Amino acid sequence: MQISPSIEIPDSEIELNAIRAQGAGGQNVNKVSSAIHLRFNINASSLPEEYKEKLRGLADRRINNDDVIIIKAQRFRSQDKNREDALSRLQALIIAAGFSPKKRMPTRPSKSAKKKRLEGKTRRGELKTMRSRVEQ
């Protein structure tokens, strides 16, 4: 599975098991093991240490105390589609963990922006004083 141009996870590190799906579906649910149970051990994987740390730090209920990601895919009636769904969800989780937001560069308002703001405040104040009662 390709995570980025330089990072790839071999299929041997991902454990896929077919299980029976829950819920509605009639006879198909009772007879066919169409749901997929995916297990991925973060510690035993070939991911870079940076990705492993970020995955461990996620507050995600799919990651248990043993640092194993468990994904259950049963959205579709077909086992193949559920397998693709589980793998794409794992890929999305790892990509999201590897993403780091750009640091914000603090900026200051320009002199003209400050001047414009103060002039607007002055104009507004004058308008409000014009609304008050006129003294006789």
Image: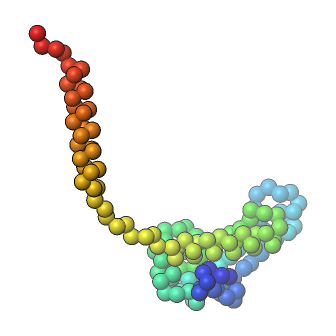
Residue at the spot x=47%, y=83% of the render? 50
Q: Is residue 107 left or right of residue 33?
A: left
Depth order, front residue of 113/7: 113
Task: Check the image and name the residue furthest to the top.
Answer: 136
Foreground residue, 1 or 111? 111
Is residue 10 visible in the rendered image? The answer is yes
User: What is the x, y in percent for residue 95?
Assistant: 57, 74
| Vertical placement of residue 133 versus 73, above or below | above
Q: What residue lies at 61% left-to-right and 84% top-to-bottom? A: 5
Quarter location, residue 116:
top left
- Quarter of the image where the C terminus is located: top left
Quadrant of residue 76 within the rendered picture: bottom right
Residue 80: give x, y in percent of width and height.
81, 72
Q: Give percent across and percent down for residue 128.
A: 24, 26
Can residue 65 be seen from the camera position used here? no
In the rendered view, would you say 135 is above or below 120? above
Relative side of 45 to 82, left or right: left
Please name whichever residue, 136 or 106, is drawn nearer the observer in this view of the structure. 136
Horizontal relation, residue 107 to residue 64: left or right: left
User: Is residue 39 rendered to the left or right of residue 19?
Assistant: left
Residue extending farthest to the front is: 112
Which residue is located at x 27 percent, y 51 percent? 112
